[in-house]
Image (cartoon, rainbow, N blue to C red):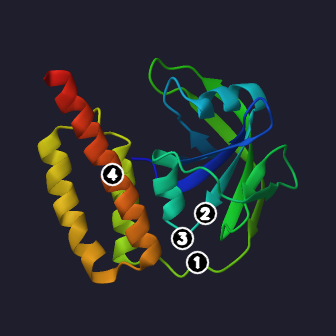
Amino acid sequence: MPFIRESIITTLREDGSAHIVPMGVHETAKGLMLAPFKPSTTLENLQRNETATINYTDDVRIYAGGLTNRHDWPTVATEHIKGVRLLNSLAHTEVEVYLQEDDEVRPRFYCKIVHEEMHKPFHGYNRAQSAVIELAILVSRLHMLPAEKIDAEIEYLRIGMEKTAGDREQEAWDWLMEKVAAFRNNNNEKQA
């Protein structure tokens, strides 16, 4: 099983603006691999530019924001590729695509590391931060998972939230729970 780093990916749209999304990055023997779903803006950007920046952050609002249409996070230009990184990232990795493999669901982009830089120390995630990241993953798969599984996972994750959440974690959690509620309301309307 591959090692997957949960991170924030920044790519450039055709107009040069930043596209910011959470994504698991796979470690490979020769570098890193990104596998965005079809269709997606990240997929289009990788095909066009063949570069991306992998951002590491402890601000879990950015994970939640990527799934709840809150994308306005400050960025700065990268130094070694045409791209941007999160201004407040703890560290970032600039990558270039050296191989693309097509797939009906998730094409694979194998990347070489061009540059890595640490900006601030990482002190680890508390349980609430981990819970928000796990909830973000669930939210990205609402259309694929049964409601019972989602409910059971949320109840378990809520334990860590209630014990260790600060303001940023609570805000991120609330955004994601609003997304869950909106998804369910939309499905209920379709069934009615």
Dot placed on the residue nearer the N-terminal end, 1 or 4: 1
Task: Report how far apart the C-alphas of labels 1 and 2 lie in the structure.
Answer: 9 Å
Secondary structure at badge 4 equals helix
Q: Is residue 160 visible?
A: yes
Residue 34 location (% of width, % of height): 57, 39
Crowd around label 1: few <14 · some 14–19 · many ≥20 (10 Å): few
Disc 4 to disc 3, C-alpha distance: 22 Å
Give coordinates of residue 116: x percent, y percent: 75, 61
**Residue 31 image offset from top left, x and y in percent:** 65, 47
The residue carrying pointer 2 sits among few (fewer than 14), some (14 to 19) or many (20 or more) residues within 10 Å by Cα, namely many
Residue 56 is tagged as 2
Q: Amino acid at mark 2?
A: Tyr
Distance from the alpha carbon under mark 4 to that under mark 2? 25 Å
Residue indicated by mark 1: 122
Q: Nearer the viewer, mark 4 or mark 3?
A: 4
Do tag 1 and tag 4 residues touch (Cβ < 8 Å)? no
Identify the mark nearer the N-term, 4 or 3: 3
Q: CA distance from mark 1 to mark 3?
A: 8 Å
The residue pinned by badge 4 equals: 178
Residue shown at 35% from the left, 47% from the top: 179
Mark number displayed over residue 58 = 3
> Which amino acid type is marked by label 4?
Glu
- For the question of whether residue 4 can be seen, the reply is no
Q: Are marks 2 and 3 in contact (CB under 8 Å)?
A: no
Name the kind of residue labelled 1 in the image: Phe
> Residue 171: where, in percent of width, then height?
42, 67
Q: Residue at x 54, y 26 (%)?
A: 107
